[in-house]
Each structure stands twice: as C-alpha cells, then as structure tokens.
Image (cartoon, rainbow, N blue to C red):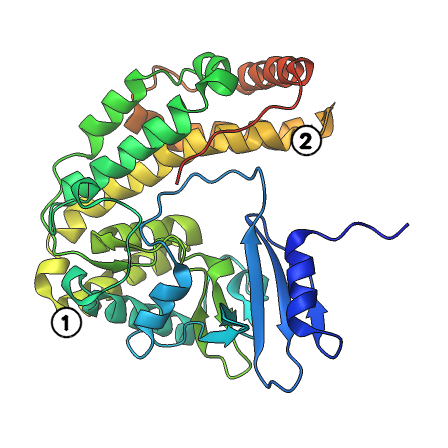
Amino acid sequence: MTPQLTGVRQRADELVGERGVVDGPLKGYHHETYVLTMPGETRIVKLREPRERILWFDRRCFRSEEALLRELEGRISRIPVIHEVEGMALQVFIEGRTLKSRPWGDRRIPEGVHGQIVDLFRELAHVTPNTLEVERSCEAEDRAEDGDCDDFLERLIVFVEKKVYKKNSERFGQLFHELGLTPDAFVQLRKNVSGLTRRDFCLLHADLHRENFILDPLNQLWSIDWELAMLGDPLYDLATHLYLMSYPEDQERRMAEDWARAVRGVRPSSARGWADDLDRILAFKRAQSVFTDVIRQSMFLREGSTVKWARFPSAVRKLQAIMTAAGGTLGLAEIPSRPRIAGALARWAMADTAAGEGQVASGA
C-alpha cells in the first residue's frame, strides 16, 4: 500500500509538476522539509513547514523568516536568497555540509571558519532596530527599550517561566517538583542574572550552532535558519553561540575576545561591559536548558504508547549534567542523584502512558 502523502509533500509535488524533482523529507526536528528542483530553473529551493505537535520553546520576534531574509540581502553575507515560486517565497537551498557533519575532533573549528563567524557578528552589529523594517510578531509594549539589557533578559525569563514551566505544569508539574524545580527557581534565577550593563541593541540570529552553519564547496560559511532572530542585546547572541557550540576553552575565550573587537569596531556602546556580563547570560542559557530539557528528555522516553526503558540511562545522565551546571543559578538546595532522577522519570513515564498520549503546550 502506498503511504499517504503529507500536506507539505503534496504541495511540493504540485509546485514542481511532472518534470521537476522533489527530494526529502530532509532530516530535521522542527520542520518537514523538501528540496525542490523546478523544471527549467537552475536554482534549487526548500519548501518547509513546522511539524505538528513538536516542542517549540523559543521566543519569536519576526512574523516571516523570508521577509527578514529579503530585508537583510546585501547587509548580511551568505544567507539564503529568497526565490519566488508560484507566488510563494521560498529559500534557495545552500549546497554543502553543516559544521556538525565536518570531520573535526575535540569541537575545534578551523581558523577560516572562526574568522567568518566573527565577520557575521560584525555584520549583525550594523543592523540596528531603527534600520530594520520587518513586521514583528511581538507588540511594541512587549519589547525592551533599546539598550535595556536587563529588561531584554527579563522578558526571556518570563517566556521560559510562562510558556515552558507554567504552561506545561499539568503534564510535567509533578516531575518538575520531584526534581526540585519549584517556582522559587525563577526567583533565584532573576537574582543571579540581573544587573546587566546597558548595550545598544542590534539584530541577533539567536541560534548560531553547528547545524545552522553550512560550509559550501568553496569553504564559504553560510548561516541558515533565521526564524529565531530578534532585536536585542548583542552579548546574548555571543552567549547563545558559545553555549551551543561547546568550543574548547581556548577557542571559546578567543571567540569572545574577537567578538568584542568586531562589535566595538562597529559601535563601542554595543560591547560595553561584555566581560562582566557574559557569565551572567551564559548562566541564564544553562538555566533555560534545565526546563526545556526536562520536557524533551521525558518525551524522548516515550514512543507512542510505549515506554522506551533502554533510553533511560542517557536521559538521566543528560538531566543530571544540565542540572549540575545550572544548580547554583537556580538556587537548588541539592542536585538530584541519578537514582532519584531515574525514579522521577519512571513515575512520570508510567503515569503519562496510563493517561494516554498528551499534548505538550508551547508558546511562540
């Protein structure tokens, strides 16, 4: 029996017609993505849509990623070009390999790649709130005043507190409680990350990790997946990048110093106080991951109506590591032992299975 096509695949087939080619779906968590070779066209484009019932735990700033990319053309080097196909704005497919797939050891990146990432941060610093005319998804009253880095971070904390922790409390509240993640953790988090220096805002990619960098055959670095881009504290972009990349210590230090030189060269006020504030924002990133990873790792243990017991050791190790890294910032009295984490996860998995497959709530 021929498997039923998804709506995205049907649209892809309709766009290319009988003489075009559709490849996919590509590997990806949040989106169902297909690569389309149009008849008579030299460009290859991507058609993608968010998967149903997938965890989305990141704040969004712009209504349309494609509209943002159009606005950034000529201002940010090596980003996906937008191509119109049947009235639809589609991103041109970047051929190459992600940094994650490159055969380098110990998380280190080559010198040429390092320099291109620094160049990207330099270009981002040029794009300020008053020079970017793209429709926003957040209301004006929900945006931090330009330069108010404390308020910018506070709004991110509120998002985690409301859209990740509280909104999912019906399904995961007992698990949070057994792991010691009470509402007081947010009180402690605010105490430990407040007091940031004012820095002039600019555009942030906000998700610069190894899978969002593509090296083409000429070793030119392209940045993709701009859907989490926002306007805010430039140092947040650096901290997010460092956290996601897991550089060796010496390369992390050098990236931070080169970032500071690059941003100061564009606008000194956008790098003000960076050395004092970087650890605070990194602490926020570690704390943020605790709440999202508790849910993600819990879901990892379920497959339909089945509990995957073989996955427990990996989930337990990951949760203990992330809670250890963020324990001080969240004011945790103690870090749960592996047996305690395993017990809490097992009770959650059995109860969740008995209750039937639930729906994870998430906000955008």
Nearer the observer, 213 or 354: 354
Would you say the residues marked 1 and 2 are in contact, meaning their CB atoms lie under 8 Å apart? no
Task: Describe the element under mark 1 as helix, strand or loop.
Answer: helix
**Residue 32, quarter of picture:** bottom right
Task: Describe the element under mark 2 as helix, strand or loop.
Answer: helix
User: In whole angstroms, how far apart are the C-alphas of marks 1 and 2?
Assistant: 48 Å
Q: Residue at x 45, y 64 (%)?
A: 224
The percent position of residue 237, horizontal first and vertical second, equals 29, 54
Q: Is residue 364 left or right of residue 344?
A: left
Q: Which mark, residue 106? A: none
The residue at the far front in this view is: 87
Q: Residue at x 13, y 42 (%)?
A: 196
**Residue carrying label 2:** 311
Nearer the observer, 279 or 345: 345
Q: Is residue 115 left or right of residue 308?
A: left
Going by the numbered disc 1, the residue's amino acid type is: Gly
**Residue carrying label 1:** 265
Q: Which part of the image, by quadrant, shows the C terminus?
A: top left
Q: Residue at x 38, y 52 (%)?
A: 228
Mark 2 is surrounded, within 10 Å at the Cα level, by few (under 14), some (14 to 19) or many (20 or more) other residues, namely some
The percent position of residue 111, horizontal first and vertical second, equals 40, 73
Nearer the observer, 346 or 127: 127
The percent position of residue 73, horizontal first and vertical second, equals 34, 76
Going by the numbered disc 2, the residue's amino acid type is: Arg
The residue at the far right in this view is: 1
Q: Is residue 311 above or below residue 239?
A: above
Q: Residue at x 57, y 37 (%)?
A: 53
Q: Is residue 207 above or below residue 333?
A: below
Mark 1 is surrounded, within 10 Å at the Cα level, by few (under 14), some (14 to 19) or many (20 or more) other residues, namely few
Looking at marks 1 and 2 on the same chain, the residue that comes earlier in the sequence is marked by 1
The percent position of residue 327, horizontal first and vertical second, equals 35, 26
